[in-house]
Image (cartoon, rainbow, N blue to C red):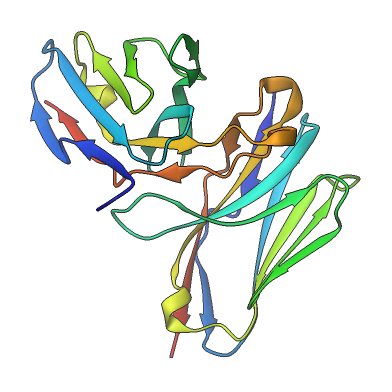
Amino acid sequence: DADVTQTPRNRITKTGKRIMLECSQTKGHDRMYWYRQDPGLGLRLIYYSFDVKDINKGEISDGYSVSRQAQAKFSLSLESAIPNQTALYFCATSDRTSGGANEQFFGPGTRLTVL
Amino acid sequence: SQKIEQNSEALNIQEGKTATLTCNYTNYSPAYLQWYRQDPGRGPVFLLLIRENEKEKRKERLKVTFDTTLKQSLFHITASQPADSATYLCALDVKAAGNKLTFGGGTRVLVKP
């Protein structure tokens, strides 16, 4: 079974709808991240959480919110989806290592289309 | 503003040759630099990490260099194979930014048999 899973894998929705993307991990990692990827722009950090009680905004948090329900679960919500939120969304995890080096493990991604 | 640049043009290379990718950055003082591989429709996969006090790191056919004076990392794939065809992303881990990664846009590599 995959260590980092995302649901749904694909979603088409309409402008104004509320959408939740879910991420679960079995790696036992404290740190979890949400990124979006757009062609030519690479991965941009939306939110990150270094433990269950720690939630931080990333580079592009406007229009998004998150919930860290447990160490293993980190959800991303779009309260009112808009077309420019059409993108590929990735969840990632990393361990809390000494010295701060943090190789990240990515999920398979959710392709979201907002019409 | 802070910037990470990778060549956005695809790199076409003949099988057996060495592919060299660049990652340039400005206005960062990274503690670590990482390289990831991403196949179409899949999440990135970690390849190598190099620390600010390291000049070079190797793993099998992969070699990474890190020049903090030039603010550049080079990523080499030696004896390239068609299976190496993918997009390669560099990512900086900046101490002052709470040890989270900032990614470049990636360079696509196509190895032709």
Closest to the observer, A25 or B96: A25
Residue A91, compared with residue B60, is above or below; it is above
Give percent across and percent down for residue A71. 38, 23
Q: How many circles with numbers are drawn on the protein?
A: 0
Residue A62, compared with residue A96, is above or below; it is above
Asked whether, in this view, residue B18 is left or right of residue A61, the answer is: right
Closest to the observer, B54 or B12: B54
Closest to the observer, B7 or B58: B58
Q: Residue at x 47, y 74 (%)?
A: B84
- Residue B104: which quarter of the image? top right
Q: Residue at x 39, y 10 (%)?
A: A62
Asked whether, in this view, residue A73 is left or right of residue B73, the answer is: left
Classify the position of the C terminus of chain B by image quarter: bottom left
- Residue B54: which quarter of the image? bottom right
Asked whether, in this view, residue B57 is left or right of residue B82, the answer is: right
Give percent across and percent down for residue B50. 74, 52
Outermost residue to the right: B69
